[in-house]
Image: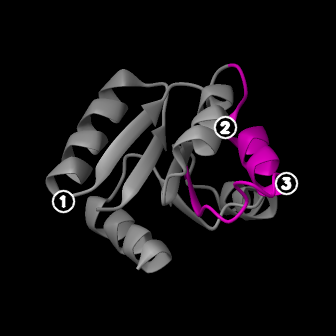
Amino acid sequence: MAKLLYIEDNEMNRDMLSRRLSRRGYEIIMAFDGQAGLDMMRSESPDLVLMDMGLPVLDGWEATIQAKADDSISSIPIIALTAHALESDKQKALECGADDFDTKPVDFKRLLGKIESLIG
């Protein structure tokens, strides 16, 4: 079973998506801000990270940059999630090192496809 780290500060988003992913057989661990997410990436070694970009303490943009600069966790795929569907946000996420990008509210089938393509 693949372990996914979902870094999201919005409780309703966290609850809804984590339950749907759990029902698909994924083990879900969660963090509520970017710094806690980085710490969990190091301690839990998830197979993939779903990273909200608008996080407190350390935003998702900077957390992604730091994760990709840390050799111990840089190989963990990150899907950036944002409520902004702008092409510039997608480009920014990819420039920060995200492996893929999706918008919120999440299209669950599309997101599942992205998860499966990144972790097999």
Q: Amino acid at mark 1?
A: Arg
Q: Report how far apart the C-alphas of labels 1 and 2 lie in the structure.
A: 25 Å
Q: Which residue is mark 1?
A: 24
* Residue in view at x 81 percent, y 51 percent: 70
* Residue in view at x 72 percent, y 64 percent: 94
Judge whether residue 53 can be spotted in this image: no
Question: Badges 1 and 2: C-beta atoms under 8 Å apart?
Answer: no
Q: Is residue 72 magenta?
A: yes
In front here: 8 or 29?
Answer: 29
Image quarter hosting the C terminus:
bottom left
Q: Amino acid at mark 2?
A: Leu
In front here: 82 or 9?
Answer: 9
Task: Please state the extent of the stretch shown in magenta in the rendering.
Answer: 57-82
Image quadrant in which you'd find residue 6: top left
Question: Badges 3 and 1: C-beta atoms under 8 Å apart?
Answer: no
Q: Which residue is mark 3?
A: 69
In the image, 12: left or right of 33?
A: left
68 over 43 or under it: above or below: below
Q: Amino acid at mark 3?
A: Ala
